[in-house]
Amino acid sequence: MESDKKKEKVTYSKRIRYLRRLILTTVAAACLIPTCICVILAVRYDRLNVRYEQAKANLDWYRERYGSETDILASGDETLPDDSDAVPPAAEEMDIDYATVDVSGAQNPEDIEGTRYVYLTFDDGPSTYTDEILDILAQYDVKATFFVCGKASNKYTDAYKRIVEEGHTLGMHSYSHKYSDIYSSLDSFKADLDKLRIFLYETTGVWSRYYRFPGGSSNTVTKVDISELINCLDESEVTYFDWNVSAGDDKSGANKDRIYNNIVNNVPRFKHCIILMHDAADKKSTVDALPEIIEAIQAMDDTVIVPITDDTLPVQHISN
């Protein structure tokens, strides 16, 4: 009888231990499974967020060039303009790395002593980052040059005006930035130039005298001989400027460190150094790198940062 009681007690204890393990296992599973699900969802969220940011940058890029969806629909054309040469920022790359291009002539005379002149230039603006760029320039008391496009949206009016009011140089970079239109004929190029020049005058009161060809004067897209386009600028009393140092921020994968190195490592090669950067919705890395770039240049001996003026010696890839 006593033996049966002991066996029953042992069996009972085993059941208790089994139930205890079952409960602990259930509780652990109840905690672990949601944790694993959360980790998986977090990873997927990060991936989707990256895709979202890229899609948003691309959307901003299209809106800056073609206008809002409402504007497109209001125009009666529900398709984007034919612009086969323009591509979203994620895919846009230049064939030539102008961070290391050798520009011969007076703009790079090794035997000239004295001050090095550095010109910070920004293409494609204004954009969502223009104000931030201007804030940084103001912080370091630096003047730059903005080669802008034509963006009639009211949200950019103040940016155009601020560029001028704060003492920066306002240059032209075509109204539409649509290679297929600008470079299709001499008449198209002239019409685009006049449209932008008048737009900027009506917006800021400045009759701009400086131009940068989309893609540079050495671009291989134009269907018109570049010398004809240069003559067109000459007749309009407009000087064009290329660059001898590039941030490389138009290339996919460009980050803050790479942009900084592309600029700071190449500035010492030139006495007259015109730096190409971009002011666009997908160029946050350029904005992030700008303060350190300015500090590094200002720390160089006999070096000053100035805006382009009538006295600036042009850097030109193609001379007429």
Image (spheres, rainbow, N blue to C red):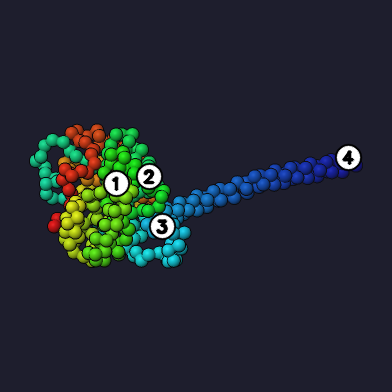
Q: CA distance from mark 2 to mark 4?
A: 97 Å
Q: Give the mark nearer the N terminus: 3 vs 1.
A: 3
Q: Which mark is residue 48?
A: none
Question: Can you see residue 99?
Answer: no
Question: Can you see residue 154?
Answer: yes
Q: CA distance from mark 4 to mark 3?
A: 93 Å
The amino acid at mark 4 is: Glu
Q: Which residue is mark 4?
A: 2
User: How packed is label 3: few (under 14 Cα within 10 Å), some, or many (20 or more)?
Assistant: some
Residue 180 x, y percent position in the rendering: 30, 64
Q: Which residue is mark 2?
A: 158
**Measuring 24% from the left and 33% from the top, which residue is drawn there?**
299
Q: Is residue 82 left or right of residue 15?
A: left
Mark 3 or 1: in front is 1
**Measuring 45% from the left and 51% from the top, which residue is drawn there?**
53
Q: Give the mark nearer the N terminus: 2 vs 3.
A: 3
Q: CA distance from mark 3 to mark 1?
A: 24 Å
- Determine which quarter of the picture holds residue 8: top right
Q: Which residue is mark 3?
A: 67
Q: Give the mark nearer the N terminus: 4 vs 3.
A: 4
Q: Which residue is mark 1?
A: 205
